[in-house]
Amino acid sequence: MRLAFCVGIYVLVAFFLDPQSFVALSQIYAEKFVVAIPILLVGGVGTAALIFGRQAPTRYAVELLRARWRGCVPVLLFFLVGMTAFSTHKSMIPGIVPFYADPWLADLDEWIHGAAPWELAHRLDHDLWAFFVFKNYDVLWYAQWFGTVLFVAMWSDRIARIRYLWALALTISIIGTLLALFLSSAGPIYYDHFVGDNRFGGLGVAMSALESSVIVREYADYLLTLHTTGNAGLGGGISAMPSLHVALAVLNAYFLSSLNRWLGVLGWIFAALIMYGSVYTGWHYAVDGYISIIAVSAIWWGSGRLVRE
């Protein structure tokens, strides 16, 4: 109930600050959920049935759904409205705190690494490698995140379940909203547009040379169009620091490590790829990911203490 109350406050603030965008986004996300959740549900429950109910997989799947759907539906509904609220908050950030931190973050990146991190990342340039990185950052990241939420929604371990849900809510609200507001920045991919020089011109050249980068460049144009027109859209909003992509991948790595050592290894490998991809694509400065890792580590530790108490 405390978690539901906190999520409700987060959602209501978004609604009252920008009701028009919130309503538009709720319709957009609801349409996506109607398509995505059944696909993930069939895949997840089907896999569980084949692993744990080999003798009668269909019966196992039906009984699993019958036993868990009442606990699953509220979690998914809160997740839907929470995502709508997050996108609403994110799209408002530049209007509340205009982008100011990019020069400092770019300078800090170069001071830490001795060069711009995107230059170091692009030393591995190859179309096949780029395609792998982009698909991990885009398609697989969403599949892992939504799949993990769906798994937790149907999980029978109430203590571990509520810990993950608290950690997820705090990660989105603190890292994805509050820190993003206080450290308002656009990221390397938009640096030259908003700051007004050619500091990351080389990044644009490197990305343009990769055929598979068209998905990144088109999405960057899409977000910029939403920003300039003030329209609400799926995944809208420009915000670099901190990286929610990295934060959620690290959160899931911690979660998977709590389940099984080998699942944890896979989770941390994936988190490292997302960290690399955030710099490779130009969506983030490297320090965006470092701050996210520190913050989500504190949240995971704190949520464990909260649940134990």
Image (cartoon, rainbow, N blue to C red):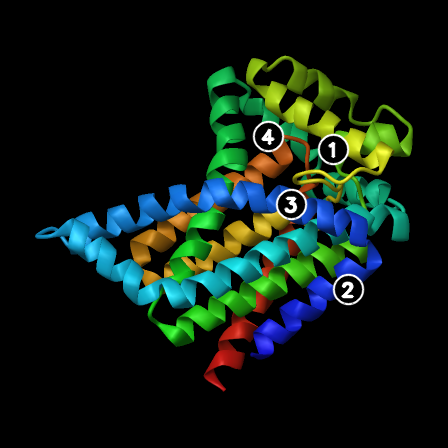
Would residue 89 be visible to someone looking at this image? yes
Q: Position of residue 118 (x, y in %)?
A: 66, 31
CA gap, disc 1 and disc 2 = 23 Å
Residue receiving disc 1: 223
Name the residue at 55% across, 18% down.
Answer: 212
Residue at the spot 53% in from the left edge and 80% down from the top edge = 306
For the residue marked with disc 3, what is the amino acid?
A: Gln
Mark 4 to mark 1 CA distance (whole Å): 24 Å
User: Which label sits on residue 121?
Assistant: 4
Distance of mark 3 from mark 2, alpha carbons? 18 Å
**Amino acid under label 2?**
Val
Q: Quadrant of residue 208?
A: top right
Residue matched to label 2: 13
Circle 3: is it few (<14), some (14-19), or many (20+) Cα within 10 Å? few
Q: Which residue is mark 3?
A: 27
**In x, y percent, where is residue 130?**
53, 23
Helix, strand or loop status at disc 3 = helix
Q: In the picture, residue 24 is in which quadrant? A: top right
Q: Is residue 82 above or below residue 125?
A: below
x, y (%) of residue 143?
Answer: 45, 42
Q: Nearer the viewer, mark 3 or mark 1?
A: 3
Q: Residue most toward the bottom?
A: 309
Whether residue 243 is visible here, answered yes or no, is no
Identify which residue is drawn at 74% across, 51% down: 22
- Of circles 3 and 2, the one toward us is 3
